Amino acid sequence: ANTAARLEGPAKYGKDVDLNSPAMTSFYAELAKRHTIIDPTLTVWEPLMTSDGSAISPEYAPFSDVAPPAVVRGWKIGGYPLF
C-alpha cells in the first residue's frame, strides 16, 4: 500500500536482519540456484532510514562531485523520522 507502512516495515524489521547469518546465506544460495535476479534498489531506501540530514549517505558520496547540485542537495536532506 502507498502508506507510511511501506517505509516503516523495512525500517522496523530490516534493521535486525543479519545478512551474514546462516539463514541468509542459505537464502542467497537458493536465489543463485534458481537464477533469481535481485534489484538492488534497497540502497535507495537506506539513507531515508538512517540519515539525520547531517551528511551524504556513503552510497551516494562517491558521486557528489559529479551529480547535479539539486540532486546532491536532496541527498543531504534528512530522511524519514528515525525511530
Image (tube, rainbow, N blue to C red):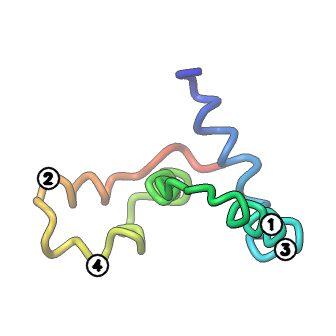
SS for callout 4: helix
Quarter of the image for the N terminus: give it.
Answer: top right
Which amino acid lies under the numbered mark 3 shown in the image of this protein?
A: Ser
Q: In this view, does 9 lie to the left or right of 43?
A: right
**Residue that badge 4 annotates:** 62
Q: Position of residue 48 (x, y in %)?
A: 48, 51
**Distance in Å between CA atoms under marks 1 and 4:** 28 Å
Q: Residues within 10 Å of mark 1 (few under 14, many from 20)?
A: few
Which amino acid lies under the numbered mark 4 shown in the image of this protein?
A: Pro
Q: Residue furthest front?
A: 34
Residue depth check, mark 1 versus mark 2: number of the one nearer the observer: 1
SS for callout 2: helix
**Distance in Å between CA atoms under marks 2 and 4:** 16 Å
Residue in the foreground of this view, choosing between 47 and 63: 63
- Of the numbered discs 3 and 4, the one sitting upstream in the chain is 3
**Distance in Å between CA atoms under marks 2 and 3:** 39 Å
Q: Position of residue 16 (x, y in %)?
A: 79, 60
**Distance in Å between CA atoms under marks 1 and 3:** 5 Å
- Of the numbered discs 2 and 3, the one sitting upstream in the chain is 3
Which amino acid lies under the numbered mark 1 shown in the image of this protein?
A: Met
SS for callout 3: loop
Residue depth check, mark 2 versus mark 3: number of the one nearer the observer: 3
**Residue that badge 2 annotates:** 70
User: Which disc is residue 24 wearing?
Assistant: 1
**Distance in Å between CA atoms under marks 3 and 4:** 29 Å
Q: How crowded is mark 2: few (under 14 residues within 10 Å), some or many (20 or more)?
A: few
Which amino acid lies under the numbered mark 2 shown in the image of this protein?
A: Ala
**Residue that badge 3 annotates:** 21
